[in-house]
Image (tube, rainbow, N blue to C red):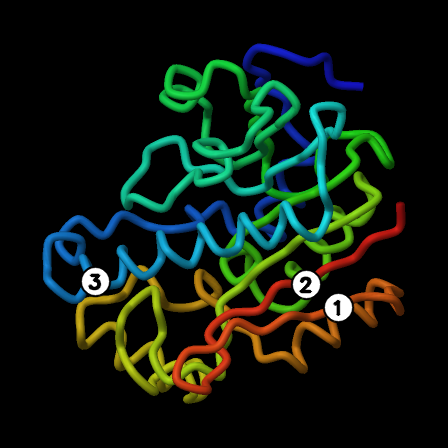
């Protein structure tokens, strides 16, 4: 079991397997050029507001206390946009929070000294079965790869915790909130990638960004043998903008 407190540099299993599973790509590549544009500033503002709403919904759904252990999967050591590491910024009991990610924890432990940061290789989580009360992941599963890698990611969330909160943007929303390009994400991957490269978004090609419809989430849950769950949609102008998957086995 991982001791509490401090920074941990624990890695997962077999680095070759990790490359196949995680692709060793950053969860959210730098977007310095986009970030200063008006559309990106608006998108960042919407993202922060959305994350506030998700955190409130998370707290209301699970009612954690100062005794609840929480695993947050997908921290970014360098914060490129305002909404990153939102749970680390705002969770009421940060000393009960462990953050897991493929980044080496260098900057984050200085910003959030009460949080335990753990580095891993992107495959099997370096924790025991049921080690945490709740596993939390916000907008990460769409970045880990295609279906098999997403299934491994969800299965690990389920393995190490008794309850899971996992959110992801909806592929059914007409604008991809990562690239801010409308409609292209509805195309087959090869055609989508050609458009992204032409528009300077090559960082979002391939398996770096694999958005999900609700039916894709349902398939993942079935493949992980989960029968009792809720999928809550956040809507904008009637369109499903994001989903929250809730599994509670406590």
Camera-nearest residue between 29 and 213: 213
Is the C-beta separation of discs 3 and 2 under 8 Å?
A: no
- Name the residue that disc number 2 marks: 245
Earlier-in-chain disc, 3 versus 2: 3
The image quarter containing residue 246 is bottom right
Image: 114 above or below 173: above
- The residue wearing badge 3 is 42
Quarter occupied by the C terminus? top right
At x 36%, y 86%, the residue is 191
**Rendered view: 231 above or below 120:** below
Q: Earlier in the sequence, mark 1 or mark 2?
A: 1
Distance in Å between CA atoms under marks 1 and 3: 30 Å
Counting from the top left corner in percent of width and height, residue 53 is at 48, 56
Disc 1 or 3, which lies upstream in sequence?
Answer: 3
Could you say which quadrant of the image residue 63 lies in? Answer: top right
Residue 141: x, y in percent?
57, 58
Image coords of residue 72 (percent x, y): 60, 38
**Callouts 1 and 2 close, C-beta under 8 Å:** yes
Q: Which residue is the site of mark 1? A: 230
Mark 3, other Cα within 10 Å: few <14 / some 14–19 / many ≥20: few
């Amino acid at each position: 079991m991982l001791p509490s407190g401090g920074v941990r540099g624990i890695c997962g299993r077999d680095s070759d397997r990790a490359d196949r599973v995680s692709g060793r790509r950053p969860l959210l590549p730098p977007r310095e050029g986009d970030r200063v544009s008006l559309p990106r500033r608006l998108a960042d503002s919407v993202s922060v507001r959305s994350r506030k709403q998700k955190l409130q919904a998370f707290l209301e759904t699970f009612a954690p206390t100062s005794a609840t252990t929480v695993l947050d999967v997908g921290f970014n050591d360098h914060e490129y946009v305002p909404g990153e590491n939102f749970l680390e910024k705002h969770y009421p009991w940060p000393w009960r929070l462990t953050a897991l990610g493929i980044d080496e924890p260098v900057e984050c432990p200085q910003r959030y000294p009460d949080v335990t940061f753990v580095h891993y290789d992107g495959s099997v989580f370096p924790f025991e079965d049921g080690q945490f009360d709740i596993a939390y992941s916000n907008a990460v599963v769409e970045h880990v790869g295609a279906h098999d890698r997403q299934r491994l990611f969800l299965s690990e969330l389920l393995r190490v915790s008794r309850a899971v909160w996992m959110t992801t943007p909806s592929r059914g929303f007409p604008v991809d909130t990562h690239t801010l390009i409308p409609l292209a994400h509805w195309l087959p991957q090869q055609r989508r990638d050609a458009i992204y490269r032409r528009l300077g978004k090559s960082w979002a090609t391939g398996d770096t960004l694999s958005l999900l419809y609700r039916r894709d989430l349902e398939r993942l849950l079935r493949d992980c043998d989960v029968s009792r769950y809720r999928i809550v949609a956040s809507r904008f102008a009637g369109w499903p903008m994001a989903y929250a998957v809730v599994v509670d086995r406590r």
